[in-house]
Amino acid sequence: DGAGELRSWYHITTAFSLVRHWFFQLPKMIFDHLTAQQLVYVHDQSNCEEVLSYFPNNISALFRWLLQFLAKIRSFSHINQLTSQQIAAYISPCLVGSKGAEKYGIDSQQAIQDSKPVADVVERLIINRVEGASVDVKEVEEDG
């Protein structure tokens, strides 16, 4: 019946902020499960979907859920004016951030600035999901 689904831009935007906060509070950030070499390799590849195979199964499932959610946010771009690039830039510090800074040899202040490789990968993954999405934007507009 669709009860509880996030069907309007307002609900999605609010949920996006809450999800971002939740991911930031994880004891180990998602991209901390990768080595620096794996991240560089995936960043340099045209098929970034390969990154999903590098994570443990539970982390891969969580990351896939996040990507589907981010694609849904992107489906409201005609209303919220958020591009895939902006969405990825907003979420990426919560995926590697300051908790992963030491691992990648950077200090905490630079962690957000240096999450660009993660943002690039996340952006491409969002685009892949939007292009293959079953979300009908007109249907969402009418229901919202």
Image (spheres, grey):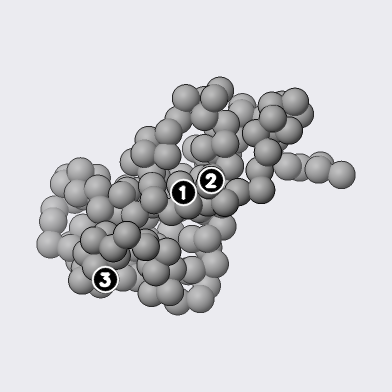
In which quadrant is the N terminus drawn? top right
Q: Amino acid at mark 1?
A: Ile
Q: Which residue is mark 3?
A: 38
Task: Name the foreground residue: 70 vs 15.
Answer: 70
Quarter-of-image position of residue 141 = top right
Closer to viewer: mark 3 or mark 2: 2
* Placement of 58 over or under 114, stated as above or below: below
Left or right relative to 37: residue 80:
right
- Residue at (32, 48) in percent of width and height: 119
**Image disc number at residue 130:** 2
Q: Secondary structure at mark 1?
A: helix
Q: Position of residue 131 (x, y in %)?
A: 53, 47
Q: Which residue is mark 1?
A: 126
Q: Amino acid at mark 2?
A: Val
Classify mark 2: residues with Cα within 10 Å, few (<14), some (14-19) or many (20+). Answer: many
Q: CA distance from mark 1 to mark 2?
A: 6 Å
Classify mark 1: residues with Cα within 10 Å, few (<14), some (14-19) or many (20+). Answer: many
